[in-house]
Image (spheres, rainbow, N blue to C red):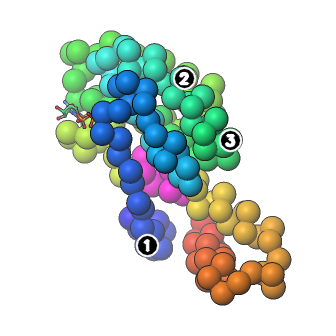
Amino acid sequence: ITLNGTRVKLQIWDTAGQERFHTLSTNYFRGAQGFVLVYDITNLDSFQGVTSWMKDIHEKAGDEVDIILLGNKCDKESERVVPKHKGEKLAWEHGIPFFETSAKDNVNIEDAFSVLTKEILEKKSWVLYDLDVVDLNESQRTLFCHFQCAASYF
Ligand SMILES: Nc1nc2c(ncn2[C@@H]2O[C@H](COP(=O)(O)OP(=O)(O)OP(=O)(O)O)[C@@H](O)[C@H]2O)c(=O)[nH]1
């Protein structure tokens, strides 16, 4: 995606149904910088599962990762069982951004990924600003310059 003129490549791992049995391998969490937690506004169970997933993410990936909460299938208003304000409240309690989305109608999908990416880059740039550049090896220095460049756009 392009953020303020800077191209950012996202590597996105989607789960393949294992989440239904709560058997996600720790590989899904290890090294991940951001999480997109999605519930279905027509499915109460999926909403009620969010808190437990939030806990899992923090336990397995740490407290520093960025998370966004999405209430998907907002095109199915007539089948809605989770009011929008409940999603907003849950996200507010966890201090994370929230969007209602429709993957079907492409509502808020780009905005959601842009916000998550922006948060990840902002955090990265602050961490790297704290480092002494002189102590970095070549690839770390390249990464530092990349994020410095990205940060200057924000
Ligand atoms: N109406 C509507 N249907 C959707 C939307 N997003 C996904 N679906 C449908 O919901 C069903 C499940 O979608 P998936 O993307 O497979 O959901 P998932 O949770 O990733 O499922 P797994 O891959 O098994 O983990 C499919 O029939 C999709 O077409 C949406 O925004 N609106």
- Compared with 105, 1 (above or below) is below
**Which SS class for mark 2?**
helix
Q: Position of residue 124 (x, y in %)?
A: 65, 62
Q: Quadrant of the N terminus?
A: bottom left
Q: Quadrant of the C terminus?
A: bottom right
Q: Quadrant of residue 84?
A: top left
Q: Amino acid at mark 3?
A: Asp
Q: Position of residue 17 (x, y in %)?
A: 30, 33
Mark 2 and mark 3 in contact? Answer it, CB < 8 Å: no
Mark 3 and mark 1 in contact? Answer it, CB < 8 Å: no
**Which SS class for mark 1?**
strand
Q: Amino acid at mark 1?
A: Arg
N-term-proximal mark, 1 vs 2: 1
Residue identified by numbered label 3? 63
N-term-proximal mark, 2 vs 3: 2
Query: At 41% from the left edge and 60% from the top edge, which residue is drawn?
Result: 11
